[in-house]
């Protein structure tokens, strides 16, 4: 159901299970908007859609995605509007409601051009498309020794002046910036970014636990792709990730493809962090998302994609080409967490991490219906909007 096809009558979606709610619930929809969530014991006689105990959620929110359908966000230009619209449509079809186009370390010229294009595109608000929620800058303020696939020639010292050069006039659309906290010895840069309302995320870093703690105390509230591009957990030096797990109010993004982090370490991280209380899934998908395996251009280099994993010629792990919700299905298939927690990691948790509203007030077209098949042991999903529209016309 889109903004232009709202129902003329009220509709209750009944016998639903929702992440964060105990027992069966009903979702009340009025004029296309979710107005209430009530226990089934409070059900009222009205037009209804019975989902027979399936899980219902809003669509996914991807806070780290580098491109799709062959387009890398740091290379976007004004003439790419049609491609960007196709990406938004594609991501909607992949169950994603909103995303942060991620600009990895690149030239100042590319940063400014890409920010300008995305700022212009964000003025559009089309139904049945994933919405751009802002921009994630992953770099250029990264530790040289933990830069991973980021090009070294574009790394910059972390100063307020350099932050201003990168962001320019587009602070209002920069939602998240990933940086190495040890580069901010005075704490001035983190304080400045927070004054602009930008969420500071830590990664590509060699920070000790004490350095991470100082950054969190100064206002950093997130960690980018946990475990990757940072020291591992150690019993004498827990490092950035160890401090993030125990520091109140800090969220960690994680890639659940089985390549960036092995399933055992995913289970340890999720159990230690209380599942969707401190962790959210990201795709970290690159431009070949939605394209077949093969070799593709990537800045001045090439990446080879095989079974959804992208690597540089020297075998450096560059990212994935798997959609966000595949991570949900993998977590359940690997028996790392239950269906409710897995769904929440891609839908509820990222919304909480960047302070987005959840169910109440959301458009009912955003709802996903998840079904667990006891026979095949598979978790599947689909958009619920078609069923809602059918219920409205019957």
Image (cartoon, helix red, strand yellow):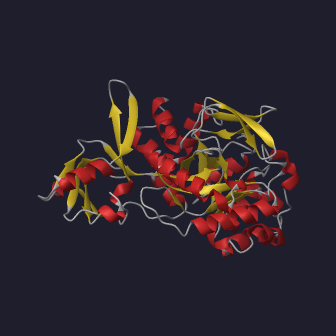
* Residue 392 spot, x, y in % from top left: 21, 56
Which of the pair 100/391 is nearer the observer?
Answer: 391
Left or right, residue 27 beside residue 20: left
Whether residue 199 is situated above or below residue 343 in the rendered picture: below
Q: Is residue 236 visible?
A: no
Which of the pair 119/262 is nearer the observer?
Answer: 119
Q: Residue at x 67, y 40 (%)?
A: 319
* Residue 323 spot, x, y in % from top left: 54, 42
Residue 359 position by quadrant: bottom left
Left or right, residue 288 beside residue 43: right
Q: Residue at x 83, y 72 (%)?
A: 161
Whether residue 245 is situated above or below residue 141 in the rendered picture: above
Q: Residue at x 59, y 53 (%)?
A: 83
Q: Which residue lies most toward the left here?
A: 45
Residue 156 position by quadrant: bottom right
Which of the pair 70/224 is nearer the observer?
Answer: 70
* Residue 122 spot, x, y in % from top left: 56, 66
């Amino acid at each position: 159901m889109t903004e232009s096809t709202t129902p003329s009558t009220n509709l209750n979606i009944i016998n639903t299970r929702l992440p964060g709610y105990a027992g069966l619930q009903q979702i009340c929809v009025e004029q296309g908007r979710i107005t209430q969530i009530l226990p089934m014991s409070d059900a009222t006689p009205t037009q209804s859609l019975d989902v027979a105990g399936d899980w219902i959620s809003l669509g996914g929110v991807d806070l780290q995605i580098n491109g799709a359908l062959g387009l890398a966000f740091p290379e976007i230009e004004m003439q790419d509007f049609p491609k960007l619209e196709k990406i938004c449509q594609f991501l909607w079809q992949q169950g994603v409601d909103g995303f942060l186009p991620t600009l990895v370390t690149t030239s100042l010229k590319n940063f400014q051009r890409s920010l300008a294009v995305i700022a212009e595109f964000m003025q559009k608000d089309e139904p049945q498309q994933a919405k751009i929620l802002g921009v994630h800058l992953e770099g250029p303020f990264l530790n040289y020794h933990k830069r991973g696939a980021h090009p070294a020639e574009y790394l910059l010292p972390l100063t307020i002046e350099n932050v201003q050069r990168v962001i320019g006039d587009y602070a209002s659309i920069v939602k998240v910036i990933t940086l190495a906290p040890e580069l901010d010895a005075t704490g001035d840069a983190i304080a400045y970014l927070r004054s602009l309302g930008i969420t500071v995320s830590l990664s590509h870093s060699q920070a000790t636990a004490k350095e991470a703690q100082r950054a969190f105390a100064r206002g950093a509230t997130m960690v980018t792709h946990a475990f990757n591009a940072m020291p591992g957990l150690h019993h004498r030096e827990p490092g950035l990730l160890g401090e993030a797990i125990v520091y109140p109010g800090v969220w960690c993004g994680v890639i659940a493809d089985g390549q960036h982090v092995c399933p055992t370490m995913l289970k340890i991280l999720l159990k230690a962090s209380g599942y969707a209380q401190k962790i959210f899934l990201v795709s970290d998908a690159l431009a070949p998302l939605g394209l077949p395996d093969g070799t593709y251009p990537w800045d001045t280099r090439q990446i080879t994609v095989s079974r959804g994993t992208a690597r540089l010629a020297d075998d450096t792990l560059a990212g994935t080409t798997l959609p966000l919700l595949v991570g949900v299905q993998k977590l359940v298939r690997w028996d790392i967490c239950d269906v409710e927690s897995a769904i929440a990691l891609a839908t509820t948790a990222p919304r909480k991490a960047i302070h987005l509203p959840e169910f109440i007030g959301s458009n009912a077209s955003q709802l996903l219906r998840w079904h667990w098949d006891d026979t095949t042991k598979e978790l599947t999903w689909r958009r619920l909007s078609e069923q809602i529209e059918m219920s409205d016309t019957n």
